[in-house]
Image (spheres, rainbow, N blue to C red):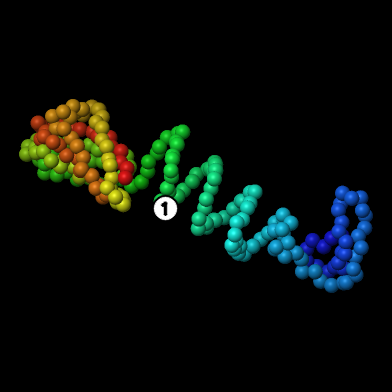
Amino acid sequence: MKATGSGYAIGKAIGSWDPSSGQTSVMVFISPGFYPGPSMSDYVQNGGNATLSGLTVGGTADFNDLNTSGTAHIQNLQVMTATVSGNLTVLGLTSLVDLQISGHIITAGNAPTIVSTPNAGQNAACSVSGNDTAGQITITTGTTNLQSGVQCSVTFAKAYANMTHPVISTTGGAGVTTDTSGIKPYLDSSSTGFDILFNSPDSGSHTYIFNYFNSQ
């Protein structure tokens, strides 16, 4: 019987044996003693299971399948083709040459903050729902002292590294004014937020709802 683990052994085989050859015996050098078992390198070389406390590869390592039941810390990872059947969470920056999405783009994150300015008039109100990337802004202008310029200022929950490029579009609803030809709204952006400005003062108290999408 071949000693596949540690224990006492009667000797060492001095010939090879192939189970498909029909051979029933092999020449053995009798040398009773304790066999410590195969080393980890023997397991790796022979395709067995290896439990390693540490593995340092100085060159190229080729694996048919690599399964990690715990956390894998990888300094650099180059993947030719990857299929992810579950969720993929990336905590740092992900750089992609091309991105093709067959499903939905779902944004998330903390909501930005928004404040109205005196230009929006007395008792004006601004509110925002969504996140730094996408959402909806509601502006209700005041009744008096309406002026052009910045109406609402949005501050991102997390600042970008560079100036962003937000876009807005109007949407309707009960009591909402969709005709913005009189005020001509436009944006002024930075890395920390953006302002919604009116090129002309509003003619009275109105409610406007803008959908926004933002990217750097």
Percent x, y for residue 80? 54, 45
Residue 30 picture quarter: bottom right
As drawn, 160 above or below 139 = below
Q: Residue furthest front?
A: 59
Side (left or right) of 124 relative to 19: left
Percent x, y for residue 84? 53, 43
Q: Tell me if residue 167 can be seen.
A: yes
Q: How many marks?
A: 1
Disc 1 residue type?
Gly
Viewer-side residue, 96 vs 7 = 96
As drawn, 113 above or below 142 = below
Side (left or right) of 68 relative to 199: right
Q: Quadrant of the N terminus?
A: bottom right
Q: Quadrant of the C terminus?
A: top left
Image point (80%, 69%), residue name: 35
Percent x, y for residue 31? 88, 72
Image point (50%, 55%), residue name: 76
Image point (59%, 53%), residue name: 68
Viewer-side residue, 149 vs 44 = 44
Identify the secondary structure beneath mark 1: loop
Percent x, y for residue 69? 59, 53
Q: Residues within 10 Å of mark 1 (few under 14, many from 20)?
A: few
Residue 111 picture quarter: top left
Side (left or right) of 160 relative to 35: left
Residue designated by label 1: 92
Image point (78%, 63%), residue name: 5
